[in-house]
Amino acid sequence: MYVADANDGRVYTYNMPDTWDARLASLALSGVDFEEFEPGRTEYEGVPDEGISQTTVSAAPAQEAATVDIAPPDADGDADGHQVDLAGAAEITVTVTSPDGSRVRVYTVALAGGAPPASCLSGDVSVGFSLLIYEGGSLEELESCAESRHVNALYALEGGEFVPYVLGAPGIVNRPFRELFPEGVPELTPLTVRSEGPASDDPGARPVAGPWESCLRGETSRGLSHVLYEGGGVGDLAACAEGLGVTALYALEGGEFVPYILGAPGFVNSAFRELFAEGVAAGAPLVARGE
């Protein structure tokens, strides 16, 4: 790593430990055309050649001691490469674990004509802030997923306060987030995220299934909380929130918070009503304020 110091005009070099390295050095899929591979980029779109029913995946890690796992599994089970049947396959993933096991990076090639892949962070990413739902997993998997969606920072809510996880920051910055999720982040955890772009839609977003023990799923506390709504009209949402002692709700659209303040004049909440003119989808993530 090279650092140019603006104060003294010098360039400093730092040797990053190889044991942390979870990158691929190369990736190739026989008979599948996709953009030029870059070790720092984790998401690609591939188009199989006409008449091709199977591809051989060749993935070499940057560090020999790293482990590489490919999905779907080897179609023929022999030692002559890793073959994937393309019929019905929506994507091919290559998961690299660093030699010391501390870092995981997932490379994905979405195949044209397949079903849209489920996203590890479900929801559209805007420049600025967005509300997403994490599929669940370790912090290393969450970080790799966030990188693939061009997310720079993630925020959980605990005790009414935001708890940040900033990608690439020193460990002391992210310690409270790691202490909050020592065993990994649970499935269907809503997170507020920040991105500097590019923005990306999520065609693979999955609905959040019931049963719903409450119209708002998630622990509401004094201050701010992340919640998931069971779905319905804005009026139904307002009645639900009032019954749970929630005084305000916030959606995120285009990187900006859109408020709904219970009991406020109509013009205050007009932007929220326009955003959800057709109703709020089941499983929609929101930020709630309680008193």
Image (spheres, rainbow, N blue to C red):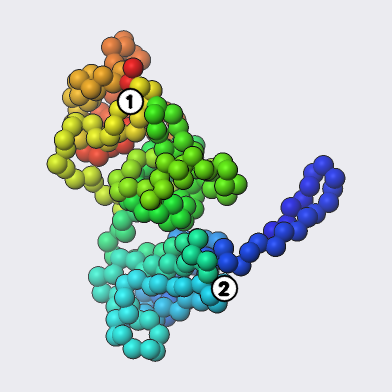
Q: Which residue is pictured at 26% across the width and 19% down the height?
A: 245
> What is the three-letter code of the residue carrying label 2?
Gln
Residue 114, position as x, y percentages in the image: 29, 65
Query: Is residue 162 visible to us here?
Result: yes
Residue 223, picture quadrant? top left
Residue 203, position as x, y percentages in the image: 32, 51
User: The residue tagged with tag 2: helix, strand or loop?
Assistant: loop
- The N terminus sits in image quarter: bottom right
User: The residue tagged with tag 1: helix, strand or loop?
Assistant: loop
Does 32 sit left or right of 197 as displayed?
left
How far apart marks 1 and 2 lie (CA) works out to 46 Å
Labelled disc at residue 63: 2
Residue 76, picture quadrant? bottom left
Disc 1, disc 2: CB below 8 Å?
A: no
Q: Which residue is pictured at 82% across the width and 42% down the height?
A: 7
- The C terminus sits in image quarter: top left
Q: Which residue is pictured at 26% across the width and 74% down the height?
A: 87
Residue 66, position as x, y percentages in the image: 51, 72
Question: Of 285 and 89, which appears nearest the observer?
Answer: 285
Question: Of 245 and 204, which appears nearest the observer?
Answer: 245
Indicate whether 198 appears above or below 240.
below
Q: Which residue is pictured at 30% across the width and 28% down the height?
A: 220
Question: Of 52 and 177, which appears nearest the observer?
Answer: 177
Which residue does the numbered mark 1 point to in the structure image?
Answer: 221
Residue 285, position as x, y percentages in the image: 31, 36
